[in-house]
Image (cartoon, rainbow, N blue to C red):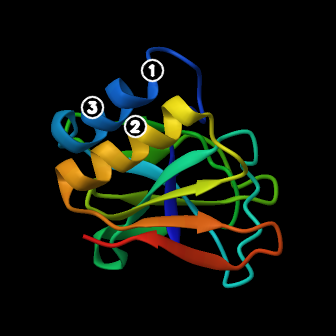
């Protein structure tokens, strides 16, 4: 599973704005975290993410590589892989919204509203690492 965590690199704006930007504003490659089948993400401070369609993944690095956008809109690593996270370069094509840990009532409502608006299922990562489908369009 490949997850584009919202708020992974800062806290500008709000959740609704972040989601709209991801769905409507991006045409270039994005970074996502590659998460194994036991779902233990290295990025744990983020609560909400977008699941990237598998066929939209361009390449996966065996660590965090930092990246910059080239003139062609593609991402290019700026260092050798480091750390325990696996970074994926992907097109912004999403197949679900996922959250982990407890959300505030406001953020939960935002997730559900955006899921209906964009026709995406909502998944939740349970404390034991299992994935539970919360809502399906």
SS of the residue under disc 2: helix
Residue 21: assigned label: 3
Q: CA distance from mark 1 to mark 2?
A: 10 Å
Circles 3, 1 touching at the beta carbon (< 8 Å): no
Proximity of marks 1 and 2: CB atoms separated by less than 8 Å: yes
Identify the mark at residue 110; answer none if there is no mark: 2
Viewer-side residue, 109 vs 121 = 109
Residue 30: x %, y % from top left: 38, 47
The disc placed on residue 125 is none
- For disc 3, the neighbor class at 10 Å (few under 14, some 14 to 19, many from 20) is few
Label 3 or label 2, whichever comes before in sequence order: 3
Label 3 vs label 2, nearer the camera: 2
- Nearer to the camera, 91 or 16: 16
**Residue at the disc numbered 1:** 14
* Residue 133 seen in render: yes
Q: Position of residue 93 (x, y in %)?
A: 25, 60
CA gap, disc 3 and disc 2: 14 Å
């Amino acid at each position: 599973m490949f997850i584009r965590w919202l708020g992974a690199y800062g806290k500008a704006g709000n959740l609704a704005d972040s989601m709209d930007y991801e769905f409507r504003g991006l045409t270039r490659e994005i970074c996502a975290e590659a998460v194994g089948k036991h779902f233990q993400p290295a990025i744990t401070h983020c609560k909400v993410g977008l699941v990237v369609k598998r066929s939209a993944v361009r390449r996966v690095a065996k660590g965090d590589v930092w990246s910059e956008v080239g003139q062609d809109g593609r991402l290019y690593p700026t260092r050798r892989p480091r750390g325990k996270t696996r970074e994926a370069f992907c097109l912004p094509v999403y197949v679900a919204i996922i959250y982990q840990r407890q959300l505030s009532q406001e953020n939960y409502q935002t997730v559900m509203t955006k899921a209906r608006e964009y026709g995406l299922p909502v998944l939740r990562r349970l404390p034991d690492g299992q994935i539970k489908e919360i809502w399906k369009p």
